[in-house]
Image: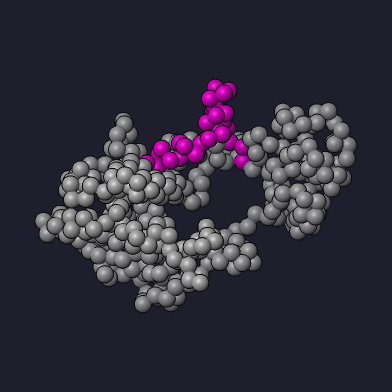
C-alpha cells in the first residue's frame, strides 16, 4: 500500500537562503509540504558556493533544497508584492530569514500578510531574534558558537576553544523552526488562527546547553573544556589502540566498570576505594586514566571493539566521513540515495532521519534550477 506524505495539504512560501531557513523548509518538504522557494534575480547566494560540481552546480545548494519549486521575484518591484499577496492568500506558512526589519521594508512582514490571510503562520529565523540588544548584530555560525558558550566547552582541556565541525547553530535553529511551525499548524487546525514565530540561532543553542547550563546554575562555575572526556562520567572517552585508531568506550555504571577493568587486566582497580563509584572516579580522574590509556595501547582497535561488544559495553570507532558512508548501517537505514539532475550526473542526497509506520517522507523533487517553476 502506498503511504501518503504527512503534510500533503501544507503550502509554504520560502523566502530563506543559505542554511538555517532552507534546511527547515526542506525538512517540511520531505514530509510532504509544497514548498515554493522565492529567489531574487541572482538566486540564493549558496547556488554559487563550493564545492562546485563539474557543470557548475553548487553541492552546497543541492544539500539543502530538494522538494522545492523555485520562482524568481525582485521583491523591490511593485509587481512582485502583488504576486506575493496572491500566493500568501493561498498558503499556510511563510518562512524567512532576513535581518530583522527587512521583511517590513519589503512589505512582506507578518502584519501585512495576515491582512490577506488571517490563518497564515509566519516564521522568522534570525541570528539573535527580533528584539533584545543583539537584534541588529550580524550573525554567522562561528560567531553564535562563540557567544553561546559552545566553543568554551569544546576542545582539549588545556587547548584553545574549538568550533564544532558542522554549522550546528543554523541546524539547531532549523529544527526549532520546524517544531514551532508544526505546533502552530496543529493549533490552527483547532482555532483557525495563524501566528508569528520568532526563532533565533542564539536562543536555539542556549536552549540546548541543558546540563552544561544546569552545571553552572548549581555550582556557579562555568564548565570547562574536557576534550574527549565526559565531564560527569568516567570512563567515558576515546582511547588510542595499538594500531593508532581511536576507540570510544562508555563504561560508567559500576557493573560495566568492573567488566571494563577485567577486560583490560586491571582487576586490582575494581575494589580500589578511590574508584568505587562514578563520582569517585570523576574526582580521581587524573589518577585512574593513565591505567586505561596504557592498557588500551596493547591491542588493536578492532580487537578491543570485539571484546567490548561481546561484554555488552557501549563502544565504537571514530570514523572519518568517508568511513561513515562506507558503513553497512548507512545502506540498511537508507541514509543515502541519488536523484537525477538535468545538468549534473545523479546527485547524492542524505536520507530521512525518521521512519514512520504508516507514512513516508519522500524526495519528490530534486533541488530546483533557478526560477525553474
Residue sticking out furthest to the left: 78
What coloring was used for the rendering?
one colour
Question: Residue 147, image x and y in percent?
Answer: 43, 36
40 on left or right of 211: left
Total marks shown come to 0
Is 219 situated above or below 224? above
> For residue 43, which quarter of the picture?
bottom left
Which residue is at the front of the view, 163 or 127? 127
Question: Residue 96, image x and y in percent?
Answer: 29, 50
Residue 122 seen in this snapshot? no
Residue sticking out furthest to the front: 190
299 on left or right of 348: right
Q: Is residue 268 magenta?
A: no
Question: Chief secondary structure of the magenta span?
Answer: helix
Which portion, as a residue range, is magenta?
200-227
User: Which residue lies at the image location 54% right of the left edge and 64% below the top edge?
Assistant: 335
> For residue 49, which quarter of the picture?
bottom left
User: Which residue lies at the image location 60% right of the left edge and 58% below the top edge?
Assistant: 320
The C terminus lies in quadrant: bottom left
Residue 226 seen in this snapshot? yes
User: Which residue lies at the image location 40% right of the left edge and 39% below the top edge?
Assistant: 202
User: Which residue lies at the image location 56% right of the left edge and 34% below the top edge?
Assistant: 211
Question: Residue 182, image x and y in percent?
Answer: 39, 49
372 on left or right of 338: left
Question: Residue 132, image x and y in percent?
Answer: 31, 31
Which residue is at the front of the view, 358 or 253? 358
Q: Is residue 221 magenta?
A: yes
Is 349 situated above or below 248? below
Is 298 situated above or below 154? below
Amino acid at each position: 500500500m502506498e503511504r501518503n506524505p504527512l503534510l500533503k495539504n501544507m503550502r509554504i512560501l520560502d523566502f530563506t537562503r543559505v542554511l538555517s531557513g532552507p534546511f527547515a523548509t526542506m525538512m517540511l518538504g520531505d514530509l510532504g509540504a509544497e514548498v515554493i522557494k522565492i529567489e531574487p534575480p541572482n538566486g540564493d547566494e549558496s547556488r554559487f558556493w563550493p564545492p562546485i560540481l563539474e557543470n557548475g552546480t553548487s553541492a552546497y545548494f543541492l544539500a539543502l533544497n530538494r522538494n522545492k519549486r523555485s520562482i524568481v521575484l525582485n521583491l523591490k518591484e511593485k509587481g512582485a508584492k502583488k504576486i506575493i499577496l496572491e500566493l500568501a492568500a493561498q498558503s499556510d506558512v511563510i518562512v524567512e530569514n532576513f535581518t530583522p526589519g527587512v521583511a517590513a521594508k519589503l512589505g512582506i512582514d507578518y502584519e501585512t500578510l495576515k491582512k490577506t490571510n488571517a490563518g497564515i503562520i509566519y516564521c522568522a529565523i534570525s541570528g539573535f531574534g527580533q528584539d533584545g540588544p543583539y537584534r541588529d548584530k550580524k550573525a554567522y555560525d562561528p560567531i553564535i558558537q562563540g557567544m553561546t558558550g559552545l566553543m568554551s566547552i569544546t576542545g582539549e582541556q588545556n587547548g584553545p576553544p574549538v568550533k564544532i565541525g558542522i554549522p550546528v547553530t543554523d541546524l539547531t535553529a532549523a529544527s526549532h523552526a520546524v517544531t514551532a511551525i508544526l505546533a502552530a499548524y496543529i493549533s490552527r487546525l483547532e482555532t483557525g488562527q495563524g501566528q508569528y514565530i520568532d526563532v533565533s540561532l542564539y536562543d536555539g543553542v542556549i536552549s540546548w546547553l541543558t546540563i552544561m547550563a544546569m552545571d553552572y546554575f548549581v555550582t556557579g562555575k562555568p564548565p570547562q573544556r574536557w576534550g574527549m572526556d565526559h565531564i560527569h562520567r568516567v570512563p567515558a572517552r576515546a582511547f588510542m589502540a595499538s594500531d593508532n585508531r581511536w576507540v570510544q568506550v562508555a563504561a560508567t555504571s559500576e557493573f560495566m566498570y568492573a567488566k571494563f577493568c577485567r577486560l583490560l587486566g586491571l582487576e586490582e582497580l575494581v575494589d580500589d576505594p578511590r574508584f568505587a563509584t562514578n563520582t569517585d572516579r570523576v574526582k580521581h580522574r587524573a589518577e585512574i586514566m593513565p591505567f586505561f590509556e596504557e592498557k588500551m595501547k596493547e591491542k588493536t582497535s578492532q580487537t578491543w571493539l570485539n571484546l567490548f561488544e561481546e561484554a555488552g559495553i557501549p563502544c565504537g570507532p571514530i570514523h572519518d566521513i568517508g568511513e561513515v558512508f562506507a558503513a553497512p548501517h548507512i545502506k540498511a537505514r537508507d541514509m543515502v540515495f541519488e536523484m537525477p539532475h538535468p545538468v549534473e550526473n545523479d546527485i547524492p542526497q542524505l536520507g530521512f532521519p525518521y521512519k514512520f509506520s504508516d507514512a513516508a517522507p519522500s524526495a519528490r523533487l530534486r533541488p530546483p534550477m533557478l526560477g525553474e517553476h
